[in-house]
Image (cartoon, rainbow, N blue to C red):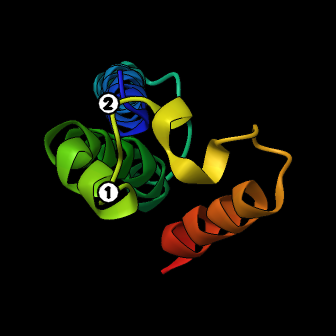
């Protein structure tokens, strides 16, 4: 698998985890509020409910846009990094360091 594929898999798993965690919290907070176990004004409960809802939305965005994010971060990803001329003598050579620097710059911008 390419680096892009691994990144996409990790982004989707993070998205599923955020979605599950957010949905559980989104459902639990109103139940606790209506059961009277949270003794706060309604606006404080709404503020507490905002984070899980946003977390769920971010998880959904990661699930659906993982491939687009991976394509942006890894535009020219080869199937095997060992065949890349920058890594001909291993990642410790001069070209390997330049290649790592180029990847870092791509991640930033």
Vertical position of residue 36 compared to residue 95: above or below = above
Where does the image place residue 84, in percent across and percent down from the top left? 50, 45
Toward the left, the furthest residue is 64
Identified at 71% across, 68% down, the residue is 98
Q: How many marks?
A: 2
Q: Is residue 7 visible?
A: yes
Does the CB distance between marks 2 and 1 fall below 8 Å?
no
Residue 87 relative to residue 106: left or right: right
Q: Nearer the viewer, residue 23 or 100?
A: 100
Q: Which residue is mark 2?
A: 5
**Residue with the mark numbered 1:** 76
Residue depicted at x 43% and y 28%: 10
> How would you rate the neighbour count of disc 2 (Cα within 10 Å): few for under 14, some for 14-19, many for 20 or more?
some
* SS of the residue under disc 1: loop
Q: CA distance from mark 2 to mark 1?
A: 12 Å
Q: Nearer the viewer, residue 104 or 30?
A: 104
Query: Which residue is pictured at 29% across the width and 55% down the height?
Result: 69
Residue 30, can we see it? no
Q: Position of residue 106 (x, y in %)?
A: 49, 71
Q: Residue at x 28, y 44 (%)?
A: 62
């Amino acid at each position: 698998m390419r680096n892009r594929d691994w990144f996409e898999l990790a982004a989707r798993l993070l998205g599923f985890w955020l979605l599950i965690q957010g949905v559980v919290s989104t459902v639990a907070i109103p139940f606790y509020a209506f059961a009277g176990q949270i003794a706060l004004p309604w606006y404080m409960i709404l503020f507490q409910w905002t984070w899980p809802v946003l977390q769920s939305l971010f998880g959904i965005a990661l699930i659906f846009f993982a491939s687009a994010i991976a394509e942006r971060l890894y535009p020219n990803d080869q199937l095997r990094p060992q065949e890349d001329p920058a890594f001909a003598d291993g990642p410790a050579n001069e070209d390997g360091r330049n290649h790592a620097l180029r990847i870092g710059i791509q991640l930033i911008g």
